[in-house]
Amino acid sequence: MENSFGLLALRASKEKTTKRLVLTALLTGFVAAPAFAADSGAFIAVDLGGATYGDAKVTGGTGETYDDPGFIRIAGGYHFTPNLGVEAGYSVFGDSKVDFANATTTLKTSVFQVAAVGTYSINDKFDLFGKLGVASISAEESGTGAAASLSGSDRTTNLMFGVGGQYNFNQHWGIRLQYEDFGKAKYTPSVFGVAQPDSEFTVRAFSVGGVYNF
């Protein structure tokens, strides 16, 4: 009987040890998995999206505002750790035009941005990230036809922020979706060489893009 109890105790001990080893392996795999999604090193990205102009009014018009344009951005950056990095990007927005009977006015915008990027990996496939930095916005208004005497441009530097998510296909390739607020742009128009009051409008953007990690 004593031998039987001894064998049972030994078998139970082995089963407990095996369960501990399996549980340890599973926990180790779970903790290590997020490192696959975001590692240290350089990356590049190309984003396409649409911008939202807030109250971008036509100079000399009767309340007309410029339409929201699309945009493209080339960006690059570096992950110092899986959770902290930096990114710089240059965005070019499509021309936004307003047509009148005998004139056309155009608003052109571009943005250069530099931001710190914080990343949180949900698992080996999904990341959430936030951006905080500065954006330099160039805005230019011009006219043709009867509005050919209309021109004006300026550059504004603002605090910018953004939030988004990224899906990682593998160690190198991913796709991201994000929202960014670049703050207010400004241009000082002139008509027949006479300066007009400054025009201000907010610039926000939604985009989807491809990412390559080196």
Image (spheres, rainbow, N blue to C red):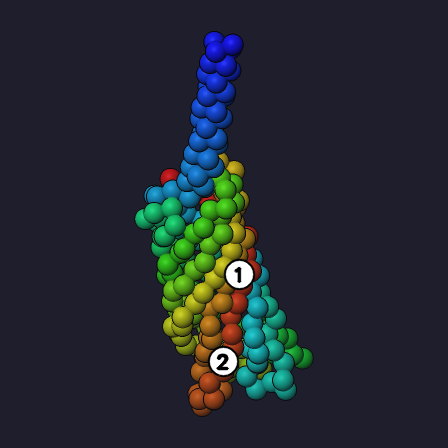
Of helix, strand and loop, which one carries label 2? Answer: strand
**Between 1 and 197, which is closer to the camera in this rendering?**
1
Q: Which mark is residue 53?
A: none
Is there a contact, CB below 8 Å, between mark 2 and mark 1?
A: no
Q: Describe the element under mark 1 as helix, strand or loop.
A: strand
Give me the C-alpha separation between circle 2 and circle 1: 21 Å
Give above or below for 21 relative to 10. below
Give the residue pinned by disc 1: 179
Q: Residue at x 61, y 78 (%)?
A: 65
Q: As displayed, is residue 8 above or below residue 187?
A: above
Q: Which three-letter amino acid code belongs to the residue tagged 2? A: Glu
- Binning the other alpha carbons within 10 Å of mark 2 as few (below 14), some (14 to 19) or many (20 upward) gives some
Q: Residue at x 52, y 52 (%)?
A: 165
Q: Quadrant of residue 134?
A: bottom left
Is residue 66 found left or right of 172 in the rendered image? right
**Position of residue 157 in the picture relative to residue 48 (left or right):** left
Nearer-the-camera pick, 196 or 30? 30
Q: Is residue 94 visible?
A: no
Neighbours of disc 1 within 10 Å: few (<14), some (14-19), many (20+) = some
Front-most of residues 153 and 35 = 35
Q: Earlier in the sequence, mark 2 or mark 1?
A: 1
Q: Residue furthest front?
A: 1
Amino acid type of the residue that numbered disc 1 sits on in the rendered structure: Tyr
Furthest residue toward left = 80
**Residue indicated by mark 2:** 200
Circle count: 2
x and y percent of residue 129 in the render?
46, 54
Residue 133: % across, % down: 38, 64
Kindly identify the residue that appears in the image at 44 percent across and 89 percent down.
195
| Residue at image point 48% right, 25% down | 16
Task: Classify the position of the C terminus by image quarter.
Answer: top left
- Closer-to-camera residue (115/150): 115
